[in-house]
Amino acid sequence: MKRREINVIIDDDLIEFLKAEKLYQDFIDKKILCYHCNDVITNENIFSLFLNDDKIQFCCIKAVCARKL
């Protein structure tokens, strides 16, 4: 698996990061889902972003999902 470095993203940077990665409109349209449970990712429930097969994935704040990281 090819590894790639991603810097830490804080709340203030999330929107700019999503725009830079061409994910902002999907985020606004509620098309981004938690990798583990398929809940819609929002500002209120986002826990983490991670790479899986060179694709940015998202994890919600549910304990069962966060523990899988």
Image: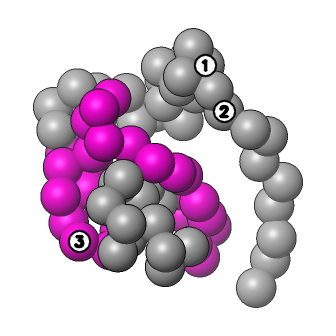
- Give the residues in magenta: 31-56
Does the image show residue 20? Answer: no
Residue at the location (61% across, 64% down)?
51
Q: Amino acid at mark 3?
A: Cys
User: Circle 2: is it few (<14), some (14-19), or many (20+) Cα within 10 Å?
Assistant: few
Closer to the camera in the image, 64 or 60:
64
Which secondary structure, mark 1? helix
User: Which residue is under mark 3?
Assistant: 37
Q: Is residue 21 one of those drawn in magenta?
A: no
Answer with mark 2 or mark 3, whichever residue precedes in sequence: 2
Q: Amino acid at mark 2?
A: Ile
User: Which residue is under mark 2?
Assistant: 9
Residue 48: give x, y in percent of width and height.
52, 51
Q: 5 left or right of 60?
A: right
Answer with mark 3 or mark 1, whichever residue precedes in sequence: 1
Q: 61 left or right of 42?
A: right
**CA gap, disc 3 to disc 1?**
25 Å
User: Which residue is under mark 1?
Assistant: 13
| Quadrant position of residue 2 | bottom right
Q: Amino acid at mark 1?
A: Asp
As drawn, the label of residue 68 is none
Which secondary structure, mark 2? loop
Asked whether disc 2 touches disc 3, contact meaning CB atoms under 8 Å apart, the reply is no
Asked whether disc 1 touches disc 2, contact meaning CB atoms under 8 Å apart, the reply is yes
